[in-house]
Amino acid sequence: MWVLGYDLNLVWSVLIFFTVFMIFYSGVISLLEDHLPTAVLELFRYGKTLNGPVKSSLVSIISVPKSYFTHFYIFSSVYIPTLLFLSLSHYTTYIPVSPSVISGLDFVCSSSRSVNTNPSSITLVLILMTLQVFRRLYECVFINQRSSSTMNITHYIVGFAHYFCAGSGYICEAPGFVSGSSFSSTLTMSSLPISSWIFSLIFIIAWCYQLETHKIFAQLKISNPNKHSMPEGSLFNYVSCPHYMCEIIIYTCLMLILGPDHRTGVMVWAWVTINQAIAATMSHKWYLTKFDNYPKNRKAIIPFIW
């Protein structure tokens, strides 16, 4: 995207803005929470950390049900597999990537981008991402229980932006998807280094634990539909937010499979890590305030440490 004569990487700009905004906003709230207007606090929080119905009339106008999470998992369950299909089509049949696809990537990721991964790595990452978004959609439709919790429209928009930026950002540095690039090796998963398979295994373990965590949340809601209960068992024995911890592990694995030269992969990882760590800290503080008998040895997101 050309802005004032500069070839702007829109995906990078969005990820950097989200990350810096989260750090700044959470810092301001941590330092000045008792002195800030209710609307400022509620614009940042969602779900249980709102401590009940939205009190600010401004925020209530732009609030939507938290169940709307389903919408951006529907989007990502179409978008990410589409990118996987394009990848497989290009690397297995040698059909050139459509000029319109490359032009679209030039627009959102800049035309000056370079190739920083290989066909096998990007394909494996897109397969794992597809598994992730399919599972999250399944959870939203079949596991998550109805709730009166809300989020404001900014959180809703961020959900769509995240999956668009992650998917587009991953593939925009892949061979064949950069103008003038080509690939010299065929798509053979056996060519992947052993480290990629280790990271894939860790991804699957985190994937399974995240599913288990959401099942525990759902069971609590079934048992006590009108109030929040204290989760227990599995990874909850160690941290307050195992689903956030697993999310960080999942995106860490994707970044490591792509390799450190894949700059967008690193940016996606940084955004997810900071976002999930801040959200976990907020939830942990809420649990400590809500439950007098909350386990003192349970950390926010990193077992035994934080």
Image (cartoon, grey):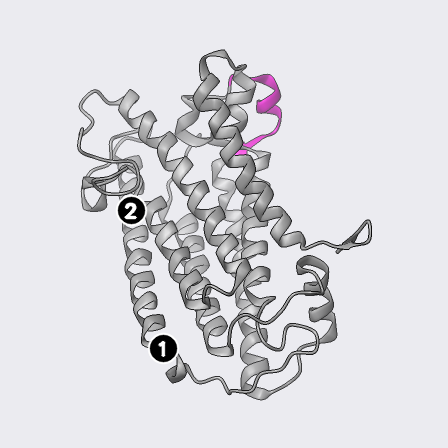
Name the side, left or right, on which 101 lies relative to 94. Answer: right
Q: Earlier in the sequence, mark 1 or mark 2?
A: 1
Q: Residue 125 magenta-drawn?
A: no
Label 1 – label 2 distance at C-alpha:
31 Å
**Are there few (<14), some (14-19), or many (20+) residues within 10 Å of tag 1?**
few
* Crowding at mark 2 (Cα within 10 Å: few <14, some 14-19, many 20+): many
Q: Amino acid at mark 1?
A: Pro
Residue 39 in the image: x percent, y percent? 56, 19
Whether residue 240 is visible: yes
Provide the residue span drawn in magenta. 55-65
Residue hosting label 2: 213
| Circle number at residue 33 | none
**Amino acid found under the numbered disc labelled 2:** Thr
> Left of 103 or right of it: where is 294?
left
Q: Is residue 227 visible?
A: no
Residue 193: numbered disc: 1
- Are the residues at dot 1 and dot 2 in contact (C-beta closer than 8 Å)? no
Q: Decide if residue 99 is on the left or right side of residue 176.
A: right
Please name the residue shown 49% across and 44% down the image: 69
Q: Nearer the viewer, residue 187 or 265?
A: 265
Quadrant the C terminus occupies = top left
